[in-house]
């Protein structure tokens, strides 16, 4: 009886972890879809995946997953096995969720509204994933490591990296929409900064410690 109870509790804990990551990915996927319909960019590996989609028509989900592969190695070396597995699962989940947009009704949203709504939604989703020991790969892994190792503000670091990515994609969306894209990443970076203390208190252990979901 005790063994069965232990196994039952362990199963419930796994489901809770799974639900947290999926919830964060669902929030981010809504923001990604909003940006896509506003024809805007975002930062990090998601921004690079947008560039591949705009330039060569490569589906966002496929480009996003492939671009993140090298960063899994960094996550494994610096952030621990649990964090790496959680991140891979989050990236795969987000890739699948954004594909659901293929079957959703088409709509058009203004660049300004898209930038605001997309930035808020993605910022909340990424902050939620950070807090629960997961990320969406790429720059997310780097900024979490820098916060863990040096105490740097993850929101500010996210903005710097995202700024460079958006600027590299100016040709694909144009100058005006690139500026709206910068507004979006400014909003999402600000939201992540709001939660930096909670993220740090939960995960800033020692440089060699691993993150738990």
Image (tube, rainbow, N blue to C red):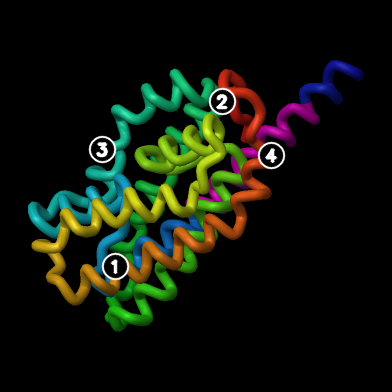
Q: Could you tell me which residue is drawn at 45 percent across and 53 percent down?
A: 156
Q: Earlier in the sequence, mark 1 or mark 4?
A: 1
Q: Earlier in the sequence, mark 2 or mark 3?
A: 3
In the picture of the structure, the residue carrying the numbered disc 1 is 181
In the picture of the structure, the residue carrying the numbered disc 4 is 202
Q: Main secondary structure of the magenta part?
A: helix
Q: Is residue 115 magenta?
A: no
In the picture of the structure, the residue carrying the numbered disc 3 is 67
Specify few, some or many for label 2: CA neighbours under 10 Å numbering under 14, 14-19, or 20 or more. Answer: some
Q: Is residue 1 left or right of residue 110?
A: right
Disc 2 to disc 1, how far (Cα)?
32 Å
SS for callout 2: helix
Mark whose residue sits in front, 3 or 1: 1
Disc 2 to disc 3, how far (Cα)?
21 Å
Q: Is residue 160 left or right of residue 175?
A: right
In the picture of the structure, the residue carrying the numbered disc 2 is 82
Residue 16 shows in this picture: no
Residues at discs 2 and 1 in contact (Cβ within 8 Å): no
Q: Earlier in the sequence, mark 2 or mark 1?
A: 2
Rendering coords of residue 118 (x, y %): 40, 68
Question: In the rendered view of the protein, which quadrant contains the N terminus?
Answer: top right
Specify few, some or many for label 4: CA neighbours under 10 Å numbering under 14, 14-19, or 20 or more. Answer: some
Q: Earlier in the sequence, mark 3 or mark 1?
A: 3
Residues at discs 1 and 4 in contact (Cβ within 8 Å): no
Q: Could you tell me which residue is drawn at 31 percent across and 59 percent down?
A: 42
SS for callout 3: helix
């Amino acid at each position: 009886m005790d063994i069965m109870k232990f196994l039952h509790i362990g199963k419930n804990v796994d489901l809770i972890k799974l639900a947290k990551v999926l919830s964060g990915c669902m929030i981010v996927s809504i923001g990604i879809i909003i940006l896509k319909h506003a024809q805007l960019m975002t930062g990090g590996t998601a921004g690079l995946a947008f560039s591949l989609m705009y330039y060569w028509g490569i589906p966002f989900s496929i480009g996003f997953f492939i671009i993140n592969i090298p960063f899994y190695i960094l996550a494994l070396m610096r952030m621990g096995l649990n964090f790496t597995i959680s991140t891979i699962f989050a990236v795969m989940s987000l890739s699948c969720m954004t594909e659901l947009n293929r079957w959703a009704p088409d709509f058009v949203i203004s660049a300004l509204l898209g930038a605001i709504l997309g930035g808020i939604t993605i910022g909340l989703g990424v902050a939620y994933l950070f807090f629960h020991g997961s990320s969406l790969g790429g720059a997310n892994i780097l900024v979490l490591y820098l916060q863990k190792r040096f105490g740097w503000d993850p929101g500010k670091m996210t903005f710097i990296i995202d700024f460079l990515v958006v600027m590299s994609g100016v040709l694909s969306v144009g100058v005006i929409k690139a500026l709206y894209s910068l507004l979006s990443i400014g909003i999402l970076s600000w939201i992540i900064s709001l939660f930096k203390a909670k993220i740090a208190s939960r995960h800033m252990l020692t440089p060699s410690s691993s993150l738990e979901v």
